[in-house]
Image: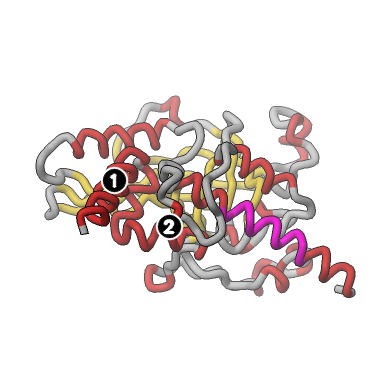
């Protein structure tokens, strides 16, 4: 890149980073009140009135995207952590309901240890994972598996003609089944449908995905990149599949994005549950604030 391109890239990157800082606040700490400025990122002051959805839309609109064709990009192959923000899916509603019910008891019945999405096999498989510890003793893991494929020309000529021109962001997702602790659970035949999944924004930290309803969903990258953006952007079609190694999804490599460092410090091991149960996060924050005031 020449100097002008470098300068333009730096300006866009700074704009994206500022928006991501705001998004991190809105996604987990937006219940912080005005007098708690010491708990907000340095220099941020009182939170703006913008919603997380508005900020995500702003990120989507900054062109060019940091990864122009995220649906076909190899770094989509990763472990992603869900953040409950915006319009909830049925799954997120259920998770929140279970978390709320658990909070009604004097002892902890359920503790969510992982709510994530794993994309693997060169972006052809997706697995939503919900891991819980019951009564502090029993570990349960629910896996919802789907297949992913890039739409073909005939798809754009038929059912998905409205998505023509979005080949680099669109995937078709087909339901495969549900497993509980490795045992497949019977599901209704009508669940075996195909829906659209748009990856409208992706970088080394976060992903914004829109399902068939159009609502944006925020996910945090939770496994290391196997290629830098500079190595990959613009070169996806020049690299043959058989010489491209898989991005590793390794528990030992998990690392939360730096934009959620304040939330990590605030909640520690509770962060996973706080990300998907906003009321629980607020209660955790309030308890910490009371402890701080008492000390």
The residue drawn where x is 65% and y is 72% is 228
Residue 2 is covered by the magenta coloring:
no
Q: Is residue 124 left or right of residue 291?
A: right
Q: Position of residue 286 (x, y in %)?
A: 29, 45
Q: Which residue is mark 2?
A: 38
Q: Main secondary structure of the magenta part?
A: helix
Q: Magenta stretch containing residue 18, yes or no? A: yes
Q: What's drawn in magenta, residue-wise?
A: 10-21
Sequence-wise, the earlier of marks 2 and 1 is: 2
Query: Residue 291's x, y, as percent?
Result: 22, 54
Check disc 2: other Cα within 10 Å, few if <14, some if 14-19, many if 20+.
few
The residue drawn where x is 21% and y is 33% is 101
Residue displayed at 43% across by 72% down: 253
Figure quadrant of residue 226: bottom right
- The residue identified by callout 1 is 286
Q: Is residue 68 left or right of residue 199?
A: right
Q: Position of residue 3 (x, y in %)?
A: 88, 74
Residue 182 in view here: no
In this rendering, the answer to whether 268 lies above or below 224 is: above
How is colour applied across the structure in the image? secondary structure
Secondary structure of the residue carrying numbered label 2: helix
Quadrant housing the N terminus: bottom right
Q: Position of residue 106 (x, y in %)?
A: 10, 41
Residue at point 24%, 49% (across, down):
290
Disc 1 secondary structure class = helix
Q: How dense is the environment of label 1, judged by Cα within 10 Å: few (below 14), some, or many (20 and up)?
A: some
Please determine whether, in this image, residue 176 is positioned above or below residue 80.
Answer: above
Q: Is residue 295 visible?
A: yes
Task: Calculate the distance from the C-alpha at mark 2 to the C-alpha at mark 1.
Answer: 15 Å
Q: Is residue 15 left or right of residue 272?
A: right
């Amino acid at each position: 890149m020449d100097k002008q391109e470098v300068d333009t890239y730096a300006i866009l990157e700074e704009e994206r980073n500022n928006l991501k800082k705001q998004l991190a606040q809105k996604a987990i700490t937006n219940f912080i009140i005005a007098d708690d400025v010491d708990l907000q990122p340095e220099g941020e002051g009182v939170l703006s009135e913008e919603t997380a959805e508005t900020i995500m839309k702003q990120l989507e609109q900054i062109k060019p995207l940091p990864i122009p064709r995220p649906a076909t990009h190899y770094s989509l192959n990763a472990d992603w952590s869900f953040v409950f923000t915006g319009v909830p899916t049925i799954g997120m509603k259920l998770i929140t309901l279970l978390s709320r019910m658990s909070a009604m008891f004097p002892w902890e019945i359920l503790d969510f240890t992982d709510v994530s999405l794993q994309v693997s096999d060169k972006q052809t498989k997706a697995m939503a994972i919900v891991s819980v510890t019951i009564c502090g003793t029993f570990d349960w893991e629910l896996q919802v598996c789907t297949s992913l494929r890039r739409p073909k020309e005939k798809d754009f000529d038929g059912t998905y003609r409205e998505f023509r021109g979005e080949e680099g962001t669109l995937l078709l997702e087909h339901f495969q089944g549900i497993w509980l602790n490795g045992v497949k659970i019977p599901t209704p035949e009508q669940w075996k449908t195909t829906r659209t999944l748009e990856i409208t924004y992706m970088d080394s930290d976060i992903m914004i995905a829109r399902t068939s309803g159009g609502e944006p969903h925020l996910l945090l990258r939770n496994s290391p990149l196997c290629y830098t953006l500079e190595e990959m952007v613009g070169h996806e079609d020049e690299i043959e599949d058989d010489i491209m190694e898989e991005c590793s999804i390794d528990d030992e490599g998990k690392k939360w994005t730096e934009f959620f460092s304040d939330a990590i410090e605030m909640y520690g091991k509770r962060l996973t549950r706080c990300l998907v149960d906003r009321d629980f996060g607020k209660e955790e924050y309030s308890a910490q604030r009371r402890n701080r005031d008492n000390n």
